[in-house]
Image: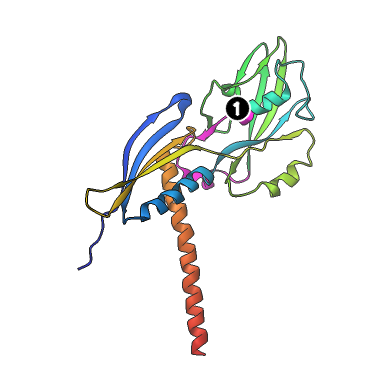
């Protein structure tokens, strides 16, 4: 008689943190003794380093040729403005990460066209329809009286494992395009613990805590990580089967 263990992924709790960041805790199991740690480490590394997201990669500001320039129309330096833009967290209204690749191909544009005096925040940016800032009150810069500021922001869907080299060649040929070294990190922190299912048994389960920047729900991030790891290992399994089959045929001949 074959004993089939029960597998589960339980959504234990969730809450909204400060600055619209999101937290959730999960239980995953069951695993035989020693397996849980291997699985938990793989999930944690994938969550922290391989979740894609929308980020601003390039900025073009009217009257600015480099990041160390100054504009008399604003209080801040251009370098500070760029840093404020880089720190802005963007999300997509759907929030289902597996739909990201169907949302956009290539680049998107957002626009700032502001007149002073006043404080300019993320809510003053004209974004594409499905892109939203997590914190609309995120400060960008302060306009002086009678000051004007015009800018074009380039938004890209970035996979942290991929490089921007192919797009960079074209963009860097354009004058006034300021590059932001911006890599998405939607998952801020991941903690896990390994626990026994019950006293006296060898089965274990993982208690997993996930904090995100608000651009993605922790549940969606976990689903993405599990699917990505499954596809990765399945690819190597398929290659190994093909190699074994080819070797078998070679032996026959």
Left or right, 151 with respect to 29, comes to right
Give the residue furthest to the left: 1
Task: Please state the horizontal and vertical placement of residue 239, each as a whole percent of the image.
Answer: 50, 69
Look at the picture and state if 29 lies above or below 134.
below
In the picture provided, is 195 more to the left or to the right than 51? Answer: left
Q: Position of residue 18 (x, y in %)?
A: 45, 24
Quarter of the image containing the N terminus? Answer: bottom left
Q: Is residue 151 above or below residue 118?
A: below
Query: Which residue is most to the top?
Result: 145
Does 207 lie within the magenta span? Answer: no
Query: Which SS class for mark 1?
Result: loop
| Residue 146 % position (x, y) | 72, 11
Per the rendered image, the range of residues in magenta is 85-106
| Residue 59 placement: quadrant | top right
Instruction: Say left or right for 153 vs 239.
Output: right
What residue appears at the point 59 percent right and 44 percent down from the top-left corner? Answer: 158
The residue carrying mark 1 is 126
């Amino acid at each position: 008689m074959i004993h089939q263990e029960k597998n589960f992924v339980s959504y234990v709790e969730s809450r909204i943190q400060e600055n619209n960041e999101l937290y959730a805790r999960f239980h995953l199991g069951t695993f035989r003794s020693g397996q849980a740690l291997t699985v938990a480490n793989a999930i944690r590394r994938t969550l922290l380093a391989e979740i894609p997201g929308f980020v601003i990669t390039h900025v073009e500001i009217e009257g600015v040729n480099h990041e160390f320039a100054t504009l008399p129309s604003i209080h801040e330096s251009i370098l500070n403005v760029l840093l404020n833009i880089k720190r802005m967290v963007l999300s997509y209204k759907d929030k289902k990460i597996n739909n990201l690749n169907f949302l956009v191909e290539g680049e998107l544009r957002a626009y700032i066209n502001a007149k002073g005096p006043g404080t300019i925040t993320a809510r003053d940016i004209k974004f594409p329809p499905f892109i939203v800032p997590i914190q609309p009150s995120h400060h960008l810069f302060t306009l002086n009286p009678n000051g004007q500021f015009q800018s074009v922001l380039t938004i890209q869907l970035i996979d942290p494992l991929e490089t921007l080299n192919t797009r960079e060649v074209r963009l860097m040929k354009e004058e006034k395009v300021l590059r932001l070294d911006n890599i998405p990190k939607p998952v801020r922190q991941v903690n896990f613990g390994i626990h026994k299912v019950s006293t006296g048994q060898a089965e274990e389960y993982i208690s997993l805590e996930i904090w995100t920047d608000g651009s993605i729900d922790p549940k969606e991030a976990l689903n993405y990580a599990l699917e990505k790891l499954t596809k990765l290992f399945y690819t190597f399994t398929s290659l190994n089967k093909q190699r074994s089959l080819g070797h078998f045929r070679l032996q026959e001949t």
